[in-house]
Image (cartoon, rainbow, N blue to C red):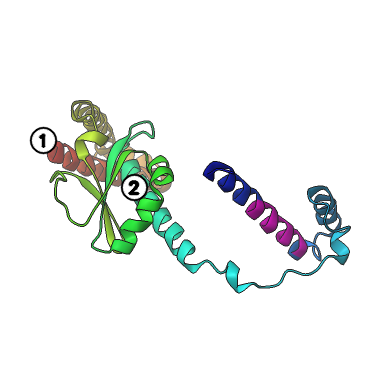
Amino acid sequence: MDDKDQTKAAAIWTLKTVLINSLKLLHPYMPFLTEEIFCNLQDEEESIMISSWPEYKEEWNFDTEEHAVETIKEAVRGIRNVRTSMNVPPSKKAKVYVVSENQEILDIFEHSKVFFATLGYASEVYLQKDKNGIADDAVSAVIHQAVIYMPFAELVDIEKEVERLKKEEERLGKELARVEGMLNNEKFVSKAPAAKIEEEKAKLEKYAQMMDQVKERLSQLS
């Protein structure tokens, strides 16, 4: 049996074991459904009603593996948050640098490179103890005992992003002018319901905030 077959067998065993024990724990609350699934899932025990109750096993306490998975999850979450904030589509891959002085953290990513790259939309994953070779404009996501860096130029087509932001700036300018015109119109203010006026004031605040963000982003890109 090669490594691929062993991995497959381990995954099937884990899935079956977890599901069967979950069914046993659920049985007092969902007797008929759990019995039906249990009897169709395995042949070792005749009925879930007379099966043994799951018992705690110390060897199933995988603290190290749990820590590794949580570390990868935190990194992936950080990467996705950064990409979302920059409107980067999932199809756009980028190099990902994991920088940490902690060798244990680097080992976690080394052993999980394949699926971490997939979940983090990475074209390549680099592990290192310092920022050597990482561009100054790289965006980052901070996790416990590590920082994840992604080259800015690989995430964003700068020319297209500037063009998009300028169009957004123009659109917001028109919206601001419209709302400000309404709120500065005495006839509108004197006749419009209070709720409508408050609605337009809320829009003004929202558009102004969005405009500030767009201008700040354009400034960064230039």
Magenta stretch, main secondary structure class: helix
**Mark 1, residues whose alpha carbon is within 10 Å: few (<14), some, or many (≥20)?**
few
Looking at the picture, how far across and down is residue 193, in whole percent? 41, 44
Looking at the picture, how far across and down is residue 68, in whole percent? 43, 60
Check disc 2 and report its element: helix, strand or loop: helix
What residue did someone put label 1 on? 222
Which numbered marker is on residue 190? Answer: none
Residue displayed at 82% across by 56% down: 44
Along the viewing direction, whichever of 141 and 168 lies nearer the viewer: 141
Looking at this view, name the residue that lies furthest to the left: 222
Residue displayed at 59% across by 67% down: 60
Q: Amino acid at mark 1?
A: Ser
- In the figure, 75 relative to 186: above or below? below
Check disc 1 and report its element: helix, strand or loop: loop
Q: Horizontally, is 156 left or right of 114 in the view?
A: left
Which numbered marker is on residue 79? Answer: 2
Asked whether the viewer can see residue 179, the reply is: yes
Q: Magenta includes 208?
A: no
Work out which quarter of the rendered image holds the N terminus and state it: top right
Q: Amino acid at mark 2?
A: Ile
